[in-house]
Image: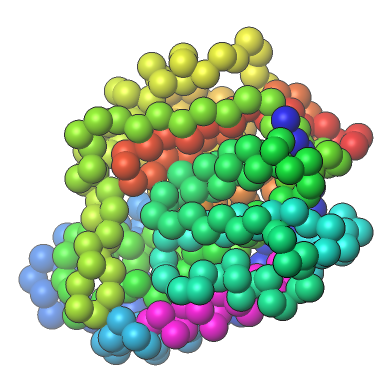
Amino acid sequence: MGRINGLSSVFPDNKVFQHEIKDLGRKLFSSRSSFKKMEKVYDNSGVNKRYLTQELDWYLSEHNWSERNVLFKKNTISLLKKSILQTIEKTNTKPEKIGGIVFVNSTGISTPTIDAEIFNLFGFNNQILRLPIFGYGCAGGVLGLNRAVTIFKSLRKSVLVCNVELCSLTFRPQIFSKENIVSTALFGDGCVSYLVEEEGNCEVLESMEYTWKDSLSLMGWGVENDGLSVIFDKVIPEFISKELPDVIKKCPVKKLDGYILHSGGMRIIEAYKKIFNKDKTIMESQNILANYGNVSSVSVLLVLLEMIKKKYCGNFMMCALGPGFTAALSKLKLNSHD
């Protein structure tokens, strides 16, 4: 099926702690009478620290769509150059031997797409297959992998996968809403890259995805004059608890040694604990949330990277959820001896 090799992560230089973000929220919204009630979101988010592309003062001012997207493109390319270089060095891969690039993100746009920018930086083959994927949110971490495996099986050449999410650039300080405050309490920035190829310590055994009908309003972006506005329905954790178990049953699994779950937030993690009987591996997702925040499609791959570093072995179910509303699943075999 293909193996994950050379998984690497890179983050912006600006590390911020939750109390700093809380202070930022106070500066922006403390004059609002209902902010005091909402303020507890920062304390209950499960996030201790995270990384942002900009200094905190940047988030105090309004910015237009053009400015945000210029920063998205600049920072995305900068982070990816470092991450891809790590992946290439770890795997001792020559760029011209790579047969495909899959680029995944949901937090900015570029045409030509970022994979074309990367193509020009690393000396890839002119006949490389490029696949940009936009809009899957957190589910993109698993769906990007699944698409890369499909390409690998067709080409029988290494496929480079890049996930970049700069969630903080979408923050709109003039908007006082629960959704906006939740996003400030939760989201961070970062990127990962890896190869899908014949070698590696993580084999993809099976995969599937499931999209629920009439669920478009649960999660997504609203497109505004000054950027993207976040859409979260408060019923998402309840929806997951109710609907995901039946989807899991559709993915043929004989025996699992644990779960690799996207760190979507404490309410999402609590839903996972309920579904998966408080499996001990869920703490890895909770730890990633605490140290990086929710980095959208990058998050579940950070959990996987941590479990590889800790030399977990056996069969694991990788799962992430995103707009659509869609569940993305992959069964992985981790082998620390590869």
Which residue is at the front of the view, 286 or 147?
147
Q: Is residue 104 above or below residue 234?
A: below
Residue 316 sits in quarter? top right
Residue at 23 percent of width and 67 percent of height? 223
Residue at 50 percent of width and 64 percent of height? 165
Using residue 163 as the reference point, say whether residue 239 is left or right of it: left
Query: Picture coordinates of residue 152 (x, y %)?
Result: 71, 42
Query: Picture coordinates of residue 123 (x, y %)?
Result: 78, 73
Residue at 42 percent of width and 70 percent of height? 108
Tell me where the magenta segment starts and ends, as one range: 68-83
Residue at 48 percent of width and 39 percent of height? 320
Using residue 53 as the reference point, say whether residue 245 is left or right of it: left
Quarter occupied by the N terminus: top right
Which residue is at the front of the view, 53 or 30?
53
Query: Picture coordinates of residue 294 (x, y %)?
Result: 46, 56
User: Does 147 lie within the magenta span?
Assistant: no
Please say whether residue 115 is visible from this viewpoint.
Answer: yes
Quarter occupied by the C terminus: top right
Residue 106 sits in quarter? bottom left
Query: Picture coordinates of residue 14 (x, y %)?
Result: 56, 79
User: Does 70 lie within the magenta span?
Assistant: yes
Which residue is at the front of the view, 143 or 132?
132
